[in-house]
Image: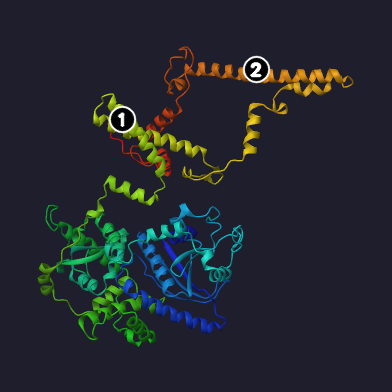
């Protein structure tokens, strides 16, 4: 059970290690000092991005790690991102910025978190898989690098059967960075996933009006990031947690005020989509659903429960005040790094904006730079803020309700079927063969022109064009798929029709010769086995018999084919009388074909019919037919036929 729990925790955790690309030959103490100084420089560099970011569970953090188990000394950390996958990709963006600003560092992808390779899986070389990617994937100088295998063009790299050590991999990356750089398609796939940063930080936030107790409003004004543990506490509540919410001792409901609360979209969705009815003894009452501020009351009620649960899990803070941040020896160097990176934007020291930026920097310093194993829990931080802040003025806070900014629209929560289809198409990477689609479209336009000549209506022609296009695309896609290569690892998707191919003429001639029976030894005839047993003493008789046997072998081959054809025809006649035989579609009778002969099957029509029936049985859900067509790049419109 413990192993299973550890495995579940690792699934939503990203680990990051930054190594010196050229390890120094100095002592371990100097290496530690160098890496520790780099931690301060890095955090000061990315502080403007991290201060405004709200993490789902754990923040980005870096600390020094000494050499251990063959792994060189490095700086790194781990972040549990929970349900918000954007936290994971924001860390990737940070690592790209860090390796670009500090070229002496390289990020090595952890063996257990191969999300970088998963994102570019369609463009990876065939030899690269989870088993051969250990210590081969790096972020260096702001770009993705993959250590290659030796090939005809270059001898640089490690064999796919060899697992290089971290030191060997870093040495190869340092000496041959151009050879190790990932291909343009792989790099573009990664850049496409990170498209929008750093502006995506603000676009991923959601501001909403909430009726919350004044104490919570005071805490969030000082620490907006504490919204995440409060929402998680409510989202993952249990009956024991709700016992503390029968009587709100920390945040009484009679002090509620309307304020603007900033969420991430993930946190807002978790809070908004849960149905919850408060205990009558709690003092929280909700207006009718038709009330204009019902949503603000409901969100505030849920948020108050989350904060009350957080505080009920911890003890009251001690009356002894904590030492100020300025007493920490790292604070002075951290402030100097912030000034060098333009964090204060030229604000005068002592101004209101300068004090606000300094307070945010202090909070960030406590969490990321000066954090220790004995750090306070979120509930303890909330209680400490309540005791350290000045008493709130309830009347003044209520007067500010009329001056609140407008809240954001939550229409992004509603996704139509067309939006979902567009998102799936974007995530599929556009693997559809454009050339084949264009050729199919041209053919369908010709069919439409013929239909117009026959005098059909325009709407019927358009429907026939769309239907015909779908049928041709499905049939051709399945044929390409069946002709593609496959192995014990699975079937490969068919390549583009424009991709060049080669044919070995000798192999083709030999295969045709064996198929057509050009060689006597290939014929399956028992008479040939007895040709060497008759009258070896008389040469003339042997030659005559050999000539006779050749003629008999040719006749035997023809008779065998005729017999097999008659046998198959008899089987077809028997199957035609069964339900299985009658279920297949057959080609239309031609004028020259006798009516009593069995018509051949129409493979394309049967294929499309069975696929469409399978899609219809899926009722719009995922299934084998839709998954297969999606992997082939074939997108069919939803079934609008009520029948």
Q: Position of residue 551 (x, y in %)?
A: 72, 18
Q: Residue at x 38, y 76 (%)?
A: 43
Residue at the disc numbered 1: 449
Query: Do residues under tags 2 and 1 come within 8 Å of each other at their CB atoms?
Result: no
Q: Is residue 641 left or right of residue 297?
A: right
Q: Position of residue 106 (x, y in %)?
A: 48, 71
| Vertical arrangement, residue 591 with respect to residue 59, above or below | above
Can you see residue 245?
A: no
Residue at the disc numbered 2: 559
- Closer to the camera in the image, 7 or 482: 482
Quadrant containing the C terminus in the rendered view: top left
Colour pattern of the rendering: rainbow
Q: Residue at x 43, y 29 (%)?
A: 604
Q: Residue at x 62, y 20 (%)?
A: 561
Which residue lies most toward the right here?
Answer: 537
Q: Position of residue 430 (x, y in %)?
A: 39, 49
Q: CA distance from mark 2 to mark 1?
A: 49 Å
Q: Residue at x 41, y 60 (%)?
A: 190
Q: Earlier in the sequence, mark 2 or mark 1?
A: 1
Q: Position of residue 394 (x, y in %)?
A: 13, 73
């Amino acid at each position: 059970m413990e192993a299973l729990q550890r495995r579940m925790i690792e699934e939503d955790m990203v680990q990051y290690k930054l190594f010196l690309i050229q390890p120094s030959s100095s002592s371990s103490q100097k290496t530690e000092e160098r890496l520790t100084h780099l931690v301060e420089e890095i955090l000061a560099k990315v502080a403007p991005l991290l201060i405004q970011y709200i993490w789902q569970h754990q923040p980005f953090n870096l600390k020094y790690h000494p050499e251990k188990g063959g792994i060189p000394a490095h700086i790194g950390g781990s972040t549990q991102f929970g349900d918000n996958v954007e936290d994971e990709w924001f860390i990737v963006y940070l690592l790209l910025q860090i390796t670009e600003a500090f070229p002496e560092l390289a990020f090595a992808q952890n063996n257990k978190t191969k999300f970088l390779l998963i994102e570019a899986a369609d463009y990876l070389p065939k030899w690269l898989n989870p088993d051969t990617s250990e210590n081969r994937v790096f972020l260096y100088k702001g770009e993705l690098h993959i250590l290659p295998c030796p090939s005809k063009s270059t001898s640089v790299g490690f064999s796919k059967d060899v697992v290089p050590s971290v030191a060997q991999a870093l040495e190869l990356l340092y000496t041959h960075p151009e050879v190790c750089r990932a291909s343009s398609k792989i790099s573009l796939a990664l850049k496409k996933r990170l498209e929008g940063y750093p502006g995506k930080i603000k676009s991923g936030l959601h501001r909403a009006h909430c009726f919350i107790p004044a104490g919570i409003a005071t805490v969030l004004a000082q620490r907006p990031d504490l919204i995440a543990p409060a929402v998680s506490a409510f989202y993952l509540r249990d009956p024991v947690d709700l016992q503390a919410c029968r009587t709100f001792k920390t945040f009484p409901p009679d002090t509620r005020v309307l304020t603007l609360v900033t969420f991430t979209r993930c946190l807002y969705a978790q809070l908004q989509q849960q149905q919850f009815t408060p205990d009558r003894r709690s003092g929280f009452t909700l207006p009718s659903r038709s009330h204009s501020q019902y949503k603000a009351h409901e969100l505030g009620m849920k948020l108050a429960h989350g904060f009350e649960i957080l505080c009920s899990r911890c003890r009251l803070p001690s009356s002894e005040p904590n030492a100020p941040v300025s007493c920490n020896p790292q604070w002075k160097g951290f402030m100097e790094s912030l000034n060098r990176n333009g964090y204060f934007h030229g604000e005068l020291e002592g101004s209101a904006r300068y004090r606000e930026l300094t307070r945010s920097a202090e909070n960030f310093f406590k969490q990321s730079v000066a954090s220790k194993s004995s750090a306070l829990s979120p509930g303890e931080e909330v209680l400490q803020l309540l005791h350290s802040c000045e008493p709130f003025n309830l009347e003044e806070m209520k007067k500010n309700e009329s001056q609140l900014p407008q809240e954001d629209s939550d229409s992004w929560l509603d996704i139509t079927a067309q939006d979902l289809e567009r998102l799936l198409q974007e995530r599929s990477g556009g693997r559809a063969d454009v050339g084949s689609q264009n050729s199919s479209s041209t053919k369908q336009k010709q069919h439409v022109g013929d239909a117009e000549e026959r005098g059909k209506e325009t709407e019927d022609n358009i429907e026939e064009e769309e239907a015909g296009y779908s049928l041709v695309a499905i049939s051709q896609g399945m044929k390409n798929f069946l002709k593609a290569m496959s192995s014990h690892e699975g079937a490969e998707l068919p390549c583009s029709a424009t991709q060049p191919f080669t044919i070995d003429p000798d192999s083709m001639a030999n295969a045709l010769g064996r198929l057509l029976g050009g060689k006597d030894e290939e014929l399956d005839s028992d008479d040939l086995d007895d040709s060497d047993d008759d009258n070896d003493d008389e040469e003339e008789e042997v030659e005559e018999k050999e000539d006779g046997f050749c003629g008999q072998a040719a006749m035997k081959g023809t008779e065998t084919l005729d017999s097999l054809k008659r046998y198959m025809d008899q089987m077809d006649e028997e199957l035609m009388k069964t339900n299985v035989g009658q279920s297949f579609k057959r080609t239309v009778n031609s004028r020259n074909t006798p009516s009593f002969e069995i018509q051949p099957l129409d493979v394309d029509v049967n294929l499309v019919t069975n696929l469409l029936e399978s899609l219809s049985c899926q009722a719009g859900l995922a299934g084998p037919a839709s998954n297969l067509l999606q992997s082939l790049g074939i997108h069919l419109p939803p079934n609008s036929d009520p029948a």
